[in-house]
Amino acid sequence: MIKVNAYAAYDATTPLRPFDFERKEVGPHQIQIDILYSGVCHSDIHTARSEWGPAKYPVVPGHEIVGRIVAVGSKVTNFKVGELAGVGCFVDSCRHCQSCLDGEEQYCDEGMTGTYNSYERGTNIPTYGGYSTSINVDENYALHVSENLPLEGIAPLLCAGITTYSPLRHLKVGKGHKVAVLGLGGLGHMAVKFAVSFGAEVTMLSTSPSKEADAKSLGAHNFALITDPAVMASLQNSFDFIINTISAQHEYATYLNLLRKNGTMVVLGVPPTPSTTPAFSLIGKRRSIMGSLIGGIKETQEMLDYCAEHNITSDVEVIDMSYINEAYDRMLKSDVKYRFVIDMASMKN
Ligand code: NAP
Ligand code: ZN
Ligand code: ZN
């Protein structure tokens, strides 16, 4: 067994605190990763606090994992000891439904196995995520990571990166499109980078006036303060796409009329309480609302390779593990620039 140091949520209301456990030795198809950096996603907060339904405590969050391979199973062919590797939001799926065969394991008909707050398939063994010093994963659910980019900036690509890359690719967003990104946090800042990189004209829609300069330096062409009714009025019928990354309760209808005829709002944020959307906010201009969930392994690798080629990483604030509860509090106040990433060396002292 491998001794692992971690931080866990023990219930929905108390701060995360240390949790030590053991992982099994690598199975024949698995690689063991010594975790170097782990990103902090708002989904970690939703889950740790049971905002999406009762969590399976203790919860060791973390699904933006990068590190170095320290062991490989006897049947592993695609990874070697000493290489970098990444793990995202899931570690297994049924492997035979149409979505799995299509390489879109996140939409597995039988449900993907989450990197945390899940059970290893067919067992009652809990999965524990990246706020830990080590993880084992089947090689088919691991990613190759570039040696040429700052590793702490790569970690958030495993969730925030692929979650924004995938719908932009699916919708073939590019030159000639006007894209609005709603919410400048972890997902939002990656959405800006990718949409700009794909050639779209990008407007940042934010509640935080202090983020205007950063939005521009991330590449956004325009910045709009959505708390200003005059600004909102001036933006009616403006965008082909809105990438909605808001983590807190809101009404889609507040933003739908910023879409042009045939425009689409891509819902990425998963607030604990739903929006009530009046039909009139959609039918008047044949607007759509579309959801999108992370991305499959194949597309995640494509995204990581794209980032390596185009020098794209996340803008991060590196923290020690012991800062995690402050980081959560700051994210809830939208005080994030633009992803907290835990330096796992802080767990090994
Ligand atoms: P985050 O870093 O905390 O950013 C969320 C941003 O939303 C905030 O920084 C803020 O930006 C904006 N915001 C917050 N409250 C708002 C409000 N009441 N009205 C308008 N804007 C508000 O969160 P994240 O990690 O990017 O995650 C965002 C959401 O996506 C979460 O719900 C998460 O669970 C979900 N998620 C979904 C997927 C998927 O596969 N679909 C994957 C990962 C995460 P401003 O300061 O600019 O206003
Ligand atoms: Zn996430
Ligand atoms: Zn499946």
Image (cartoon, helix red, strand yellow):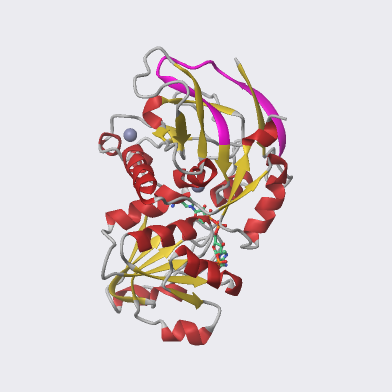
Q: Residue 342: percent from the left, percent from the top?
A: 62, 42
The residue lying at 61 percent from left, 62 percent from top is: 334
Q: Position of residue 113 (x, y in %)?
A: 45, 33
Image height check: is 281 above or below 296?
below
Answer whether residue 130 is visible to the viewer in this image.
Answer: yes
Q: Quadrant of the C terminus?
A: top right
Q: How many marks?
A: 0
| Residue depicted at x 70% and y 30% | 19
Residue lying at the far front of the rendered structure: 148
Residue 332's place in the image compared with 259, above or below, is above
Residue for point 35% across, 37% down: 297
Q: Nearer the viewer, residue 49 or 278?
A: 49
Task: Please tell me whether residue 268 belongs to the stretch shown in magenta.
Answer: no
Task: Give percent across and percent down for residue 13.
Answer: 71, 47
**Which contiguous range is marked in magenta?**
17-36
**Which quadrant of the figure has residue 39?**
top right
- Can I make out residue 58 in this image? no
Residue found at x 37% / y 63%: 196
Q: Is residue 303 left or right of residue 251?
A: left
334 w.r.t. 14: above or below: below
**What kind of secondary structure does the magenta stretch mostly adopt?**
strand
In the image, is residue 28 part of the stretch drawn in magenta? Answer: yes
| Quarter containing the N terminus | top right
Q: Residue 294, how many percent across, how many down?
A: 41, 47
